[in-house]
Amino acid sequence: MTDAQTGSTDTPEPEVAVLGRLMPLKEGDAFLVADPLGDMSGGADGFFLRDTRILSRLRLLIGNAAPSRLSSALSDDNVFFVCQGTNRPLPPMGGRSAPAGIIHLERRRFLWQERMYERIRLTNHGVDEVILPLAVEYGADFRDIFEVRGSARPARGRSEPPVRDGRRVRFSYKGLDDVTRRTCLSFSEPPASMSATRAAFQLTLPRGRRFDLYIEAGADTCEAPDRERWRLASIQARLAMRARRRRGGGVRGHRSPRFNQWLDQSRADVALLTTDLPTGPYPYAGVPWFSTPFGRDAIITAWQMLWLDPSLARGVLTYLATRQGTTTDAFQDVEPGKIMHETRGGEMSALGEVPFGTYYGGVDTTCLFVALAGAYARRTGDRALIEALWPNLLAAAGWMEARGAANGLGLIDYQRARDTGLSNQGWKDSEDSIFHADGRFPKGPIALLEVQGYAYQAWQAMAAMAETLGQDAAEWTDRAGRLKAVVEQRYWMEDQGFYAIALDGDGAPCRVLGSNAGHLLFSGLAEPERAADVTRTLLSARFRTGWGLRTLATRQPRYNPMSYHNGSVWPHDTALCVAGMARYGERDAVARVLDELYSAAVNFDMRLPELFCGFSRETGEPPVPYPVACMPQAWAAGSVFLLLQASLGIDIDAPGRRVRVDRPRLPSGIDRLTVTGLEIGDSRLDLVFSHIDGRTTVRPLHRSGPPLDIVATS
C-alpha cells in the first residue's frame, strides 16, 4: 500500500526508517515516531499532526550525554511508550563526579487528544547526593510527510524564530498554502537556561530521592504540564483504548498464552490505528507513512474484522460514502461514483504539489466498497444503513458499468490520467509490479485479475441488496454471470493451471503467476476445478515460504524476495488467499498456513509488519524483515482474524438468523478455542471449539436474544 511520487518509485527511501527501531504512538490524526531511547532526531522521527511534522527534534541528555538504555517497549494496549535507562559517568559538579549506573531514568509517553504527554522520572540509587545536569534539545521543522519521505520541494514557507516564555517555547511556520502551523513545547519546571533549541536543568537529587519532569507538546494550546494533568490524560487515553479494543466479539485459546498474545497484540494494533471519526470508527492504514484514511486498506481491514466487529465496516462504508467522487479531474484520478484511494492533510497536498488531498487512483476500491456493503448487510441485517447508502452504491455501480463499457468486455481496468498519479492502481501499486512473462511492462488500460473478482462480488452484492430492498436484482445477477464467463475465458492459462495476473490494453494476458489468483478465490468467481488447481500451486514451494505466501511465484520474471511486491510476503495477502481456499472447502492447509504466519509473528514480537522478505524458511532462522515496512499496519494486524474465520469455517447470515460452522480446524497446539460475544441481530452467541480424538467439534452457547439456527458439519 503506497503513495505515488512524481518521478520516483512508490516505496519510501530505505535510509529514513529501519524496522524494529521505531517506537510508534498514534491518537486521532496525530502520531509520533521515536527511537528506542524515546528521542526524535530527524530522519523519519517526529511528532506528526495531519501529515505535518510539528516536532522534529526532542532529545534527552544527562550530563551532556545520551543515557544508556536498559529496555524500551510499548505497553500491551499500545497507549504508553516506556524507556528504562541509566546515566553514563557524570562530569564533576561542585567538586564531585558520579559514576555510571546510579541514576535510574524512566521515560513514559503517550498521546491524548492529539497532544504529547511525557514524564521523565529520575531516581538516585547512589550512596551520595548527586548534582545532575539535565538537558532537552528540541526543534520543529514543519515538514510535510512527503518531504520527510524524500520528496524535494522547489520552495517552502517561512519559519518564525522560536519564542521562549519561562517554561515554554513556541514554534511557528507559515506555509505556502497561507496556513500558519504552530507547536508549543512546555515543561513543568522552569529551566536554568533556555535557548531556541535547548532547555537545561540543574538538579540536586539526594540519595534515594526521585524527581519528575513533565513535558507536553501540542499544535495550539500551551498549558503548563503537571502531575495531575498527566494523570488525568493518561486515564482518559487508556479508557478510550480499552473501549476500542472491546468492540465486538472476542477470541481466546485455552492454555495458549503465546497464541493469545498474538490475538491481543493484533486487536490492540487495530484499535491503535482506528480513529473515531464523526462517521464512525475508521482504521488508518499504518504508521509511519500511512497514518491517514485509505480506501482499500480500510475496506479490507473492516472485512477481516467483520465477523467479530461489524462496527468497523459500518464506519468505513459511511465515511467513504461521504468522499465519493462527483466530478471528473485527471490530477486526482476522480470520476463520478468512484471511491477514494486516500486523503491527506499536509501543505503539499493543499497546494497540489502531490494529488493526495483526496485521491482516487485505486481501481479496486469502488468494487470493494460495494462488495463490503453486501458482506456487511449479510453479517448484520442492517437494512437501514443499506437504504441510506443505496444512492452511493448505485453511483459506484454506475462507475463500474462505465469502466466495463469502455473496453466492451465488462472488465474493470485502469490507466492513470496524469503522470503524477499511481502507474499501477491495484493493491500491488509499485511501478514494476505488473508485467508480461518476458518482463515487459504492459500497455494500458490494464485489467487486473483480482479486481474482476472484486467486481464479481460487487455485482452479486448489488443483487442481494436489491432483493432486500424489494427491487429487481436480475440486472446485477446478469452482470456477475457475464463477468465470470469473460474472466474464465480470457485469464485462464490451461498450460499453467493458473490465472494470468492481468490483461493489457490489447487484451493480451500477462502470463505471470502471482498471488492475485488467491484473491479471485476469495471472490468465489473461479470454477471449483480451477480453484483446486490454483490452491495446489499456491500451496507449493513456489509460493509458500513456510512463513506465508509470496506475492509472486519463484522463477517468474522480476521475482525478487526482497522487493516490495514481487516475491515478498504480505500477511493480508496471505490471509485473503487462504480465505479463498477455505471458500472452496480447503481447511487443513488453511490451518497450516495460519500456523506458519503465527510463527512469523513470534519472530516479530507478535506484531506482524506490513510485509517481510519472501525467503524460504530455514530451520532455526527467523523471517527476514523488509527494512521500511510500516509497523503496525492495519490489514497486517487484521490478518489473524480472517485466517481464524477461514480455519474455523464460520459463516454468519444475520437476515436468515443462521450461523454455519463448516468442518472447523484449530491451529496446532490449541485443543480448545472460544469465540465470545458474537452479536447477530438481537442475539448474542458464544462458540466453543474443541479438538478431541483427532477431530474438531463446536458447541454453541446461546447467551441472549431470540434463538439462532446453528448448522455445524465436521
Image: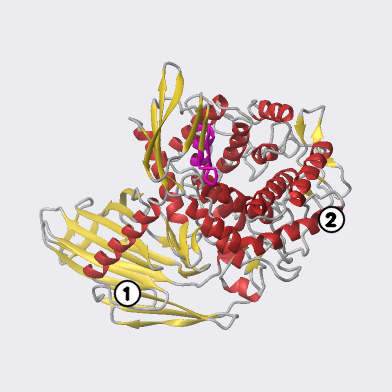
The residue identified by callout 2 is 405
Q: Nearer the viewer, residue 467 or 360?
A: 467
Q: Secondary structure at mark 1?
A: strand
Q: State the extent of the magenta-drawn residues as a range.
A: 641-658
Magenta segment: does it hold 649? Answer: yes
Specify the amino acid type for callout 2.
Answer: Ala
Question: How far across and how far down the image is residue 85, in percent?
Answer: 28, 52
Disc 2 residue crowd, few under 14, some 14–19, many 20+, Cα 10 Å: few
Question: How far across and how far down the image is residue 144, in percent?
Answer: 56, 69
Task: Give the answer, above or below, for where 241 lies relative to 602.
Answer: below
Q: Residue furthest right?
A: 506
Q: Secondary structure at mark 2?
A: helix
Specify the amino acid type for callout 1.
Answer: Ser
Mark identifier at residue 156: none
Q: Does residue 691 show up?
A: yes
Disc 1 residue crowd, few under 14, some 14–19, many 20+, Cα 10 Å: many
Q: Quadrant of residue 319?
A: bottom right
The Cα atoms of the two marked residues, 2 and 1, are separated by 60 Å
Q: Is residue 55 left or right of residue 68?
A: right
Q: Is residue 262 left or right of residue 460?
A: left
The residue identified by callout 1 is 186
Q: Residue furthest top?
A: 693
Question: How far across and how far down the image is residue 282, in percent?
Answer: 50, 59
Q: Nearer the viewer, residue 179 or 516?
A: 516
Magenta segment: does it hold 183? Answer: no
Q: Residue at x 60, y 40 (%)?
A: 576
Q: Does residue 628 show up?
A: no
Task: Give the answer, above or below, for where 378 lies relative to 147.
Answer: above
